[in-house]
Image (spheres, rainbow, N blue to C red):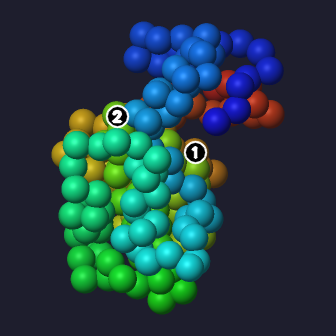
Amino acid sequence: MDRPDAGTITADAREVTALSRSGLVAYRRTLGFVFQHFALLPALTARDNVLLPVLPYRVDFDRPARADQLLDEVGLGGRENSLPSQLSGGQRQRVAIARALMGTPRLLIADEPTGNLDSTTGSEIIDLLLELRAERGLTVILGTHDEALAARCDRIVHLHDGYVAAPAA
């Protein structure tokens, strides 16, 4: 979302930091984001929140049907018309995950996806992310302070003040 102050970002054999403005827009369409605080619009239904990432674009699928399918996949079938205020924290995070998957990303970036959840619900959300990763062949980059959560990941990189602090595990 932001350009780095220094260095480069290379992903999928492409130097992202060298992309033009339109190239960055196209690249961002291959990403999904899950935010710690859900980032759901309170006046929109679960379905409408899931639809948001693809509204400005032409797509080759039925948007509402895909949103409903994704909500069903994350365990929220039947809650398509619920407002965020009518959902629990775990359900809101499931809506956020469905929204992140709407554009069929290859890379999913999750910032503290369990940070606002109790340990049981947080574990369910991580199970869901790992299941979706396996089913869809996604790469998932997850930021967390939770060592138990990090232990469930394939690779761990510790950062300190923005720098790699320990070798990848």
Q: Is residue 25 left or right of 61 when viewed as pictured? A: right
Crowd class of label 2 (few under 14; some 14 to 19; many from 20; radius 10 Å): some
Q: Position of residue 89 (x, y in %)?
A: 51, 77
As displayed, is residue 63 above or below residue 87? above
Q: Is residue 159 left or right of 78 when viewed as pictured? A: right
Any part of residue 127 in sight = no
Determine the residue positioned at 46% across, 28% down. 26
Determine the residue positioned at 35% across, 51% down. 102
Q: Name the residue that disc number 1 marks.
A: 143
Viewer-side residue, 169 vs 3: 3
Q: Quadrant of residue 166?
A: top right
Query: Mark 2: which secondary structure?
Result: loop
Determine the residue positioned at 57% across, 56% down. 35
Q: Quadrant of residue 125?
A: bottom left
Q: Position of residue 115 (x, y in %)?
A: 60, 63
Viewer-side residue, 53 vs 149: 53
Q: Position of residue 50 (x, y in %)?
A: 40, 62
Q: Is residue 166 left or right of 109 when viewed as pictured? A: right
Q: Position of residue 83 (x, y in %)?
A: 47, 83
Query: Mark 1: which secondary structure?
Result: strand
Q: Name the residue that disc number 2 marks.
A: 106
Any part of residue 84 in sight = yes
Residue type marked 2: Arg
Numbered tag placed on residue 59 in the rendering: none
